[in-house]
């Protein structure tokens, strides 16, 4: 191991300050593994040297690369099933009943990783709503520039499509591009990807009918979760729907949400008057 306690603390503080991600003590191995490729690209022998160099002369590009390297981008198609299938079985009919069948739908995938989440939503809506591309906009955001680029590209390896994408949907919505699979132009028209740090002031967006804020609150401390939930709520329509990850909840974090059981999972709706 090349990283000292002082270097590890410096990385932890940097990552917390810039992204709100909490790196617990004991994650030295993670810092080593994620930062070694950056050290090598910058011509340095080890992570200790990289940290010393950036500490002594911090520059925005190097610090950002370090922060982004410490995000965890694990994702898959239809992750956990119900948060996606209930979009078209329950959420969409409820929104159409209260608003009329032709109103535009604005959806936010707020930690989109490499794009599986926003394109899962796009495929479901394209199959459920004739001409969906003209009526649905999906805003896909992530702190990581690499993940945003990957979402924009809409290209996935065979290994990635094997993780949860049903074969009929692959055939319907993708074409082969060399060794990869590329999403159809119709899906791409629905999805707009950009960087957005949930821990910083949010850009003017929305108002959103449905927000997927999945498997990202787990990385933050309680005050950060509370602040993000409050600011996300401000960008949602009063009758909107919020989906969190299976290990995440608003309960005991922010009591201005009502929990609704949907299949084997739950969604959260802004409490009226809260
Ligand atoms: C585990 S992935 C979850 C992806 C997807 N939502 C899912 O459930 O499969 C977490 C994502 O959150 C992003 N992330 C971490 N901190 C963030 C922050 N402060 N602002 C925005 N995105 C962040 C990471 O870059 C990563 O792509």
Image: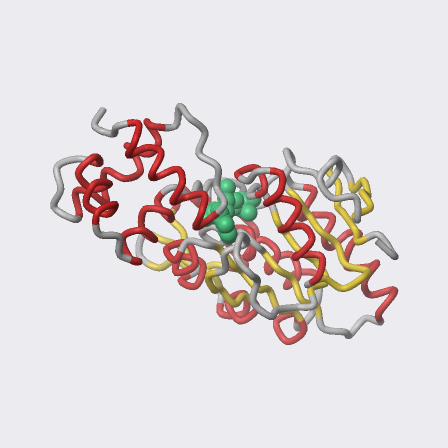
Whether residue 192 is visible: yes
Vertical relation: 59 (above or below) 85: below
Residue at 66%, 46% (x, y): give it: 226
Whether residue 75 is visible: no
Residue at 37%, 48% (x, y): give it: 68
Residue at 31%, 38% (x, y): give it: 34
Vertical relation: 145 (above or below) 79: below
Residue 222 in the figure: left or right of residue 11: right
Relative to the observer, which residue lies in front, 75 or 232?
A: 232
Q: How is the image coloured?
A: secondary structure
Residue at 69%, 70% (x, y): give it: 130
Residue 228 horizontal/vertical position (percent)? 62, 51
Relative to the observer, which residue lies in front, 198 or 179?
A: 198
Count of numbered circles in the view: 0
Relative to the observer, which residue lies in front, 67 or 156?
A: 67
Name the quadrant of the N terminus: top left
Residue 272 horizontal/vertical position (percent)? 87, 56
Relative to the observer, which residue lies in front, 91 or 259?
A: 259
Residue 200 in the figure: left or right of residue 58: right
| Residue 160, quarter of the rendered image | top left
Residue 241 horizontal/vertical position (percent)? 75, 54
Residue 118 horizontal/vertical position (percent)? 56, 56
Residue 274 in the figure: left or right of residue 242: right
């Amino acid at each position: 191991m090349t990283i000292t306690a002082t270097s590890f603390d410096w990385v932890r503080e940097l990552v917390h300050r810039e992204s709100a991600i909490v790196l617990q003590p004991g994650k030295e191995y993670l810092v080593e593994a994620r930062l070694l490729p950056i050290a090598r690209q910058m011509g340095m022998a080890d992570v200790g040297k990289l940290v010393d160099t950036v500490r002594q002369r911090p520059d925005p590009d190097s610090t950002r690369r370090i922060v982004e390297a410490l995000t965890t981008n694990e994702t898959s198609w239809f992750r956990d099933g119900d948060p996606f299938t209930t979009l078209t079985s329950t959420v969409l009919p409820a929104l159409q009943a209260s608003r009329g069948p032709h109103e535009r739908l604005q959806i936010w995938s707020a930690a989109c990783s490499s794009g599986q989440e926003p394109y899962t939503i796009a495929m479901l809506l394209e199959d459920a709503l004739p001409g969906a591309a003209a009526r649905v906009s999906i805003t896909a955001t992530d702190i990581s520039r690499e993940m945003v680029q990957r979402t924009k590209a809409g290209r996935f390896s065979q290994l990635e499509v094997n993780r949860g994408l049903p074969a009929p949907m692959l055939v319907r919505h993708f074409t082969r591009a060399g060794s990869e699979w590329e999403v159809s132009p119709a899906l791409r028209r629905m999805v707009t990807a950009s960087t957005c740090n949930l821990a910083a002031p949010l850009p003017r967006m929305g108002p959103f009918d449905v927000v997927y804020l999945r498997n990202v609150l787990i990385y933050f401390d309680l005050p950060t979760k509370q602040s993000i939930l409050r600011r996300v709520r401000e960008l949602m329509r009063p009758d909107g729907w919020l989906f969190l990850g299976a290990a995440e909840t608003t309960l005991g974090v922010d009591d201005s949400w009502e929990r609704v059981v949907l299949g084997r999972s739950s969604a959260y709706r802004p409490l009226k008057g809260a």
